Image (cartoon, grey):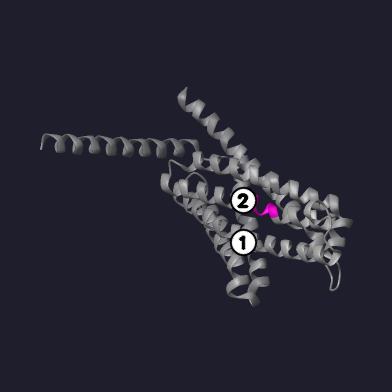
Amino acid sequence: MIATATDRSLKRMSRAAGELYAAIFLLAPVGFLIGKSPITGLGEGESATFAILQNEQLFRLGMLAEVGVVIIELVLAALLFALFRPVSRSLALGAALTRAAEATIQAVNLVPSFIALSAATGTGVYAEMSASGRETVVLASMAAYEFGILVWGIPFALHVLFLGLLVARSGLMPKVIGWLLIAASAGYFLDSLAPVVLPGAAGVAETLVMVLAIPAELSFAVWLIVKGVRAERWRELAAESDGLRADALVGSRADVATSVEA
């Protein structure tokens, strides 16, 4: 009876994690690519302020999608920790914290978009600013936004690495998915660091991360939705983990008792 309940609980948790991961696949392009396309697609001599004004609703939609991504990332971090904690508590905690760190930086990185939107529309403190001044603010804000993406890419690369190690060593799902995630983490690291360390390789890094990350993360999400983690293996790992903690607790109590007697 307990095993059956655990199986159902793990299935629901796995499906929820997979569906949230899939939701990020849908929202992230809207937030980080489509919503910002009026700015990233500017031609030489074109006005960033005018581009935002002409596509204001799309820009706002992109920001809303980013808020959705942040919320999902935080919930997903907790779900993945619960699923993989029996494998390695330290690795699972590292994966959860790095994903939460990524989400936090993403939330902070909404600020440049708000500033750019306010400057473009001439609201608030920008109401009395000249058109050229507002254009400068918009361009500077969006440059800061692009740098913020590079920054949150680093904890995310660490998260994908930790997640790949957890999958590869757990037996909860096919080991190949873990190795794909580890390879994807290398792509994410390169994508975040190349513009700073090797600017000439930035384009190659962007292509590489797409080639490596999409199969890895998509297969991970689909497996969670369709199959879920292997319940019997999860229970084995949980029993081993509980046993190790119990042994450690008994050992620490024995050490304390010996110290008192001495």
Point out residue 172 in the picture as x, y percentages from the top left corner. Answer: 49, 44
Q: Is residue 11 visible?
A: yes
Q: Quadrant of residue 184?
A: bottom right
Residue nearest the observer in this picture, 175 or 60? 60
Residue found 57% across the figure and 74% down from its top: 197
Point out residue 9 in the picture as x, y percentages from the top left corner. Answer: 54, 30
Drawn side of residue 168 relative to residue 24, left or right: left
Helix, strand or loop under label 1 = helix
Residue nearest the observer in this picture, 118 or 211? 118
Q: Quadrant of residue 126?
A: bottom right
Residue found 74% across the figure and 52% down from its top: 114
Helix, strand or loop under label 2 = helix
Amino acid on which disc 1 is placed: Leu
From the image, tell me which residue sits under label 2.
219
Q: Is residue 176 visible?
A: no
Whole-angstrom CA distance, mark 1 to mark 2, is 11 Å
User: Is residue 195 depicted above or below 188 in this figure?
Assistant: below
Amino acid on which disc 2 is placed: Ser
Point out residue 127 in the picture as x, y percentages from the top left corner. Answer: 83, 55
Residue nearest the observer in this picture, 140 or 238? 140
Q: Are marks 1 and 2 in contact (CB under 8 Å)?
A: no
Residue nearest the observer in this picture, 114 or 123? 123
From the image, tell me which residue sits under label 1.
212
Residue found 84% across the figure and 61% down from its top: 49
Question: Can you tell which mark lies on residue 204?
Answer: none
In this view, the residue farthest toward the bottom is 200
User: Is residue 6 depicted above or below 157 in this figure?
Assistant: above
Point out residue 239 in the picture as x, y percentages from the top left corner. Answer: 38, 35
Q: Quadrant of the C terminus?
A: top left
Q: Which residues are magenta?
A: 106-111
Residue found 64% across the figure and 49% down from its top: 107
